[in-house]
Structure formats: structure tokens, C-alpha cells
Image (cartoon, coloured by chain):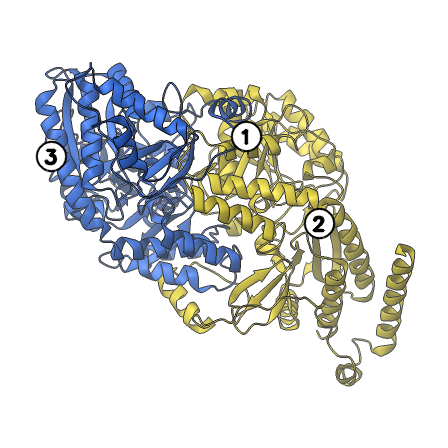
Amino acid sequence: MTVSLATRLVTRRSPPLHWRRGFARAAVDAETNTVAARELPPFDYSPLPYAGPTADEILAKRKEYLSPSILHLYKNPVNIVEGKRQYLFDENGRRYVDAFGGIATVCCGHCHPDVVEAIVNQTTKLQHSTVLYLNHAIADFAQALASKLPGNLKVVFFTNSGSEANELAMLIARLYTGCHDIISLRNAYHGNAAGTMGATAQSIWKFNVVQSGIHHALNPDPYRGIFGSDGEKYAGDVQDIINFGTSGHVAAFMSEAIQGVGGIVELAPGYLPAVYNTIKKAGGLFIADEVQVGFGRTGSYFWGFEAHNVVPDIVTMAKGIGNGIPLGAVVTTPEIAEVLTHRNYFNTFGGNPVSTAAGLAVLKVIEKEHLQQNAFVVGSYLKERLTALKEKYDLIGDVRGRGLMLGVELVTDRELKIPAKTETLHVMDQMKELGVLIGKGGYYGNVFRITPPLCFTKEDADFVADAMDLTLSRM
Amino acid sequence: MAMMAAMQRSLKTTIAVAKHRARFSSLRPSAAAAADTLVPPPRLPPFDHQPAPYNGPSADEVYAKRRTFLGPSVFHYYQKPLNIVEGKMQYLYDDSGRRYLDAFAGIVTVSCGHCHPEILNAITEQSKLLQHATTIYLHHAIGDFAEALASKMPGNLKVVYFVNSGSEANELAMMMARLYTGNLGMISLRNAYHGGSSNTLGLTGINTWKYPIPEGHVHHVMNPDPYRGAFGADAARYANDVQEHIDYGTSGKVAGFIAESIQGVGGAVELAPGYLKLVYDIVHKAGGVCIADEVQTGFGRTGSHYWGFETQGVIPDIVTMAKGIGNGLPLGAVVTTPEIASVMAQKIHFNTFGGNPVCSAGGLAVLRVLDKEKRQAHSADVGSHLLERLRVLQQRHEIIGNVRGRGLMVGVELVTDRKDKTPAKAETAVVFEKLRELGVLMGKGGIHGNVFRIKPPMCFNKDDADFLVDAFDYSLSKL
């Protein structure tokens, strides 16, 4: 296929000259390899011309005015100026497949028209007034959200982020039980505030400040964990912690059903039900952190915990809940929620009309466009293709996850499972050059995280797998 | 021209005062009753905007849903809660299309005005382009906003962290203080409010907002409250309490001190003049950093200065902000020096939503609007007029114990006894309701719930101020 034909297929309108040149580079490179570079799946949209600051100008400003702990991906960081569905556009108008979803956050797709409409409509009416006054948006969304949860989980608290949601969940659990001890998993990520930093369990995210009352249990990691996939054996560690590290009573156990930041680690089967029983005997509450895994992303279920056959006492969510708008939520039972009545708890921005209108629109889109089913179908297909790549390349140690929450772990030695950290960075960079934006995670930074918008298609999946294939073949 | 207007206003006030004195005294109920029929309630200033017809759920329906799905701890204003469906500049509209003067701005949050066209435009345009991608990719909005915000800061305060709320900002500030100094002890004021998360609950100093969880190393010092404090406005004696806490309650070294320059939730309490200067010195000598919580006082609201801490003549080491920063967008920020910020480079600290393109674009628009429309000067101007009129009111109504604040951050405290300063909690609740009926939505605060908080959108004008005071006058007369 000639360059000009490929270009016409992709862009369909007369693209600026520099696009064509940019695209030509990738195709020419491909000619020197056995695996051919693919064109992005067709997409009938042209981004607006961009006249803003360049990547270099932005980098300079970031260096001067933003936190030194702020990181960015890639040796040549990409200046993302526009998004549409599962694609992002850089300052040159180049399109990328967004296989990371702004960290599992953009679930309906960038600038999904229904969600944008809800946001714009509400913003023009009323942005903010607080829950001191009534407004139907918060009530309607709370009701719709509650209807997605099992059991008696129907009281909703709105926050502005996952950290805030988890902080509140921890507070509620401690108040409800009168106990301080909380158990979380090694390799977990729950947030960056005082309490949640304690629950988070990877040294890179933990600052040298006092974090009290948290016990980190053995991670039921089927790939790297000491008991392989024997969920019940790992659960024994939780019982040990309770028996020997606490008064015998705890406030809560909290975990993600599939660890996100930790590198898409699915908890070993049988683990959560066993832990659930243990925690209940110790008087504790079960907190399910659905910040990344919720809203149909896993395909087979709406919530991650559903795959493990447990009904939590408290569920926390953020990220995908608003397709990118700053929003978080804690859902629990009326009985547990009652503890907050003893004093005043208030969140100024939480539950504002715009964020809740967006949240409601997101739920409607997920249903209308069958995004959960799509995540299942496309996700399974992608996992198959990635598993096939694992057969082909020794560098791939593990392929795991469900639906559109997938992980690919790179190792330099399959037996010793030595993390292939540098290789991961290299592959990430190369894939960007080919037009795929992917995520990274895991304690060793050697796991690809694939958590795209749930409108991701089979063509997109093929494109990602092929790009990975091409990159690995060149190494 | 301005002179004439000023004279007219002054004349209007004098006439109103004379009228009122001539009307009736609270000791003569029958005369008061007779006067009711003679004096009509004040009317809202005119406003050229028609709210959209509302076809959504009624107040009762919404209230019922809230009780079921938002849980028993969600509270609300007014016995019959108000269903607010639309906002425009300094006014709000309920489900029947009735207009109210918003004297509370969604808790000091709607700084430019509800649905201000420029802010709306910035939000809608960016929402259509890119809502979210996170800082792992570049985007110009966050840098532009950080730069603009930093330019408003004195000293070397120029590194900005974006978060999503005031609680998140104060959490981060507190962590920075501990990391930077290597010390543990934090000092905050009694009657302070700093947030509802683990660490900030500790900093908060009002029991109604504190749940019984471990706080660890937080010292609540005497509040330099000129009205209720033991030392009146004598800043030095309050500052001494800080020294004592350090000397006797810590290792002698502390992590930091945090305060609002005018306490918000605590009831618009202005710290005794000169207090922060003395305390900042004490804290620095004990190895600590000084944090200014500008969540409510920032962005020109105090009129005399852009930041509340400037009214005390100090430069903090860390400044936190939220609420008004985005005119209602969920946005917060922490600004500090490169030196202090560098401790955060030891590990990764990430905020998924923080600094997103839409909030950054909105925040930048807010800064521009506030500058363009000269909201700080306007707040000074309208605020002084408001305070002047309230002070006159104080002379007429025994129940007003204190009028305080500056710019458009004003508090009016009701007491049943001016000497004992007994909080007039019940009366405040009654007047609060009455004001709503008249079309004024106020805020309420103070540990006893007896302080009116007047903190409107900064487009609030003198006519609004007059209406508010007249309504207040009318309501108090009815007690």
C-alpha cells in the first residue's frame, strides 16, 4: 500500500502537509521490517488547528511553576491538545489510540457528546450552590448510582476524587467500628492524603510522614505471589495480622478487585470471599475500592467485586464515574452511614450540579452504548491477541486482567521473573511513535496498563497488539 | 457626580434611621404590629434576566430522594429547604422562578458570579476539546494557570500544586510542612476550619466538625478573637500562647502553623491585628513553616488586599486555596517556594484530576475576570458601604453584638446580652428564615450558630448591599 493511499484512508479530508510527512515516516520505517506498521483505524474527524504553546514551552513552564514531583511519560513528552472518543490528538494534529484512558478515567470516550451536552447545559444554568440548598441533579444521580449496587448499598456521599472517597470510607469504618486498624494489600494504591497514603502500599508513593493504624497483608498476586493462585492461603495472612497485630478487632479491610497502579494484578481466586469471612468475624467492614475497576470496565460485571462474589459494606469510586470530571463517591448502607450524623461532615464541591449531571450522563451512555458488553468483547479479544504475543516473545512474562483492564508484564527472565524495566520504557516510547498511548505500572514499572475508553473497538485492539508486536520484533 | 451619589446615599440612610426611630420601639408590640402594616418589606434591586422555565422535580421530590440516597448526615439550610435551579451573577432562582440575592455565594465559592459568561465560555470551549488526560501528557492550560496564579503571589511563592478541594490542599500543605521540617507538631487555631479528611480534621478546631479519630501532634492555640477572646485585640498575649504550646507541648520544634486570616466557618472572625506577624516569627524560630489558608479569604474578597494574609502584613511559606479559585469548579491549589516544594520530589505525588484542562481554563478565566472587572477594589468599595450600614444597624438593634470583617467577607454576630455576649442562637435561626422569605440568602456560622456570614459573589453591588441591610433591619424589627 502506498503512502499516499494510506494517508487518504486515514484522514479522508485534505490533511495539512506536516501530517502526511509525519505519517510517511512510520510507513517508511516499516519497510525495513518483516512486521508491517499499520495505519490507525479510520476515524472520521479532523482536530481543530492548534495555535497554542508548543511542547517545549509547556515543559519549561511546568518546570518553573509546577511541583517537582510531577512526572510525565516519554523521553519526548507528547502535547495532547484534543480528544475524541478513544483517540487523542497532539499539537501537530497527529492522532493516537488512547489505550490508557487518562488512567482508566475516560470511560465513555473523550468529549463524548452526551456527556459534554450534560456538562454544558448544567454549567449554563447553575455550576455550584452546595447541598445546603436542594437541586435535583445530585439526587437523581445518587439514585441512579445506588441502583447499580447490590444489597443495601444505597447511601451516596459525593467527593471530588478517589483519595477523598477512600479517606471518607476509612473515616466511616473507623467511626462505625470504634477501631483504628485497617488492613490493605501490599502493592495497593488508594490515594495520597494522610489516611489513604497509609493504605497505599508501594514505597514510591509513600512519603516519610506518620501513617498509622494500617497493616499490609500479603498480596494475593497469582504471578509474583508466594502462594501462586491459592487465594485461601493468602487469606490466612489476614487472619494472622488480626490475631497477632491487632486487638482482634479491626475497622476494615480494603482492596481493589484488580490492582491498578500495582500493575493490573487480579486478586487470586477465592481470596476475597475468604477474607470477607475473616474480617466479619473481627467486626470489620469490607471496603471495595472501585476507582479504576468499576463502571463496567471489567466487562463481565459492572463492579470488580462482583467477580469475587462478595457484597462490600462500603464501595468507593472516582475516575471513570464522570468521564474525567473531578468526581468521586462513597456508597454504603444507611446503617453504616448513620455514624456521620454524630458530627458535621461537609464537602463544598461534592455533589455539585455539573459533576453530578455529568455522572448521570455517563451512566446513561454506558447503558445506551452497551459499553460493559463492549469491554467484555473487545477486552477478551485483545487479551487473546496479547496472549498470542506472549507465545511469540520471551520478554512477555504475563498477560492478565479482564475486559478493558489488561496488563502485560515484561521480564528479562521468565523463570526468575526479573523485571524488564528499561525494555518497558523503550517499548512504551516506540509504541507512542507508532501512534499508541499506553500506560505503565507495577512496583517495578515493568507492566503495561491497558485501560482505554470503553468505546474501544476490535480495530483499535488490533492496532495496539500489532504496534506491540512490531516494537518487540525490532528489539 | 460621585459626590452627589454619596450624598444621596447618606441622606437615604439618615432618613431611614429617622423613620425607624420614629416608627416604634421593640417595647411596644402593639405599635410594632401597627407599624407592620405601614412599612412594606424591602424589594430586590431590579435585574434584567429571565430564568428558564423549570420542569424538573419539585422541592419535595428532591428532598425525599436526598433523604433516601444521600443519607441521614446530609444537612440543609431552612426548615423548608430551598430548591435552587438556576443562578446568574449575584442572584439565584428557585423552582418557581423566584429570585434571591445570594449573599453567601455557595459558601464563598462563586467569586465572579453565577454562570459568569466569560467563565462559562472558558469551561464550555475546553470541555468540547479535552476534559481530561492527566499531567502524564503535556497540556498548556495547567502551566498557563499556574503561571498566572504564581504572579499574584509575593515573595518566592511560585510553585503550584493543583488539587480538587480545600481539604486536599490543606492535607498536602500539612504533609509538606512535616516533610520539609522533619518535625511533627502542627499548630492551628481554636475555631478554625481546614477540612474534613484525616489530617485536616485534626487541624480543624470546632467540635461540631470533628469526629473522634486519632489526630496526632496537633496543638490548638487560643483564638485571637477580638470580640470573644480573653485578650480582646491584644495580639501579643495570644501569640504568647503559641510560644507556650511550643515550649511545653512539643520538643521545642514544630512542623508548622496554619490559619485563616479571617475565619470562615468560625463566623467571619478577623484575627487580632498584628497576630500573624508575631506568630510567624515564633514558628520560624521553632523550625516550622507558616501556612496561610486562603480558601475563603483569597482572590480580592477582603477588598484591601488580594490575599487575606496581606491584611496581616506577612508572607507565608505555603498558601492554600480553593472555593472561589474556580467560581465553583472543583479546584484547589497549594502554592509554595521552590525550596519547600523540592521535598516532594523524594517520591511520587500524583493527583489524577488535579490541573485538568477544564478546571485550569476555568481558573485562568476567573483570574482574568477578577482583574478586568476590578473585583478587589469593588469589594473594598461595596464592602465598606455594607459595613457602614451594618454598624448603623448595630446602633439600633441591641441584638447585634458585633459587626466585623472587611471587603465582602463580613460577619454579624447576634447576642441576647451585649455584656455577657450570650449567643442568640434561636433568634439567628428566626432571622435567617425571615431573610430567606424576603429574598436574601445568607450564610451562618460560629460555633454557636449565631453569626451571619455575608460573603456574596464579588459582583454584589451597593444596591444589593442596601437591600440586604434593609431586609436585615426589617427582619430584626420583627423579632
Residue identifier under label 3: A384
SS class, disc 3: helix
User: Which chain wears blue?
Assistant: A
Quadrant the N terminus of chain B occupies: bottom right
Q: Which residue is mark 1?
A: B160
Chain of the residue displaying label 3: A
Above or below: residue A390 compared with residue A285: above
Q: Where does residue B438 sit, x and y in percent of width and height?
A: 66, 72
**Mark 2 and mark 1: Cα distance apart in space:** 36 Å
Of callouts 2 and 1, the N-terminal one:
1
Circle 2 crowding by C-alpha within 10 Å: few under 14, some 14–19, many from 20 = some
* Nearest the eye: A220 or A246: A220
What secondary structure is marked by label 2?
Answer: loop
* Label 1 CA crowd tier, 10 Å (few <14, some 14–19, many 20+): many
Closer to the observer: label 2 or label 1? 1
Q: Residue at x 42, y 23 (%)?
A: A208
Query: Which of the 4 quarters of the picture holds residue B314?
Result: top right
**Foreground disc of the pair 1, 3:** 3
Q: Which residue is mark 2?
A: B228
| Chain displayed in yellow | B
Under circle 1, the secondary element is strand
Q: Is B12 or A87 nearer to us in this picture?
A: A87
Looking at the picture, tell me which residue is in the foreground, A321 or B317.
A321
Q: Amino acid at mark 2?
A: Arg
CB under 8 Å between discs 1 and 3: no
Few, some or many residues within 10 Å of mark 3 (<14, 14–19, 20+): some
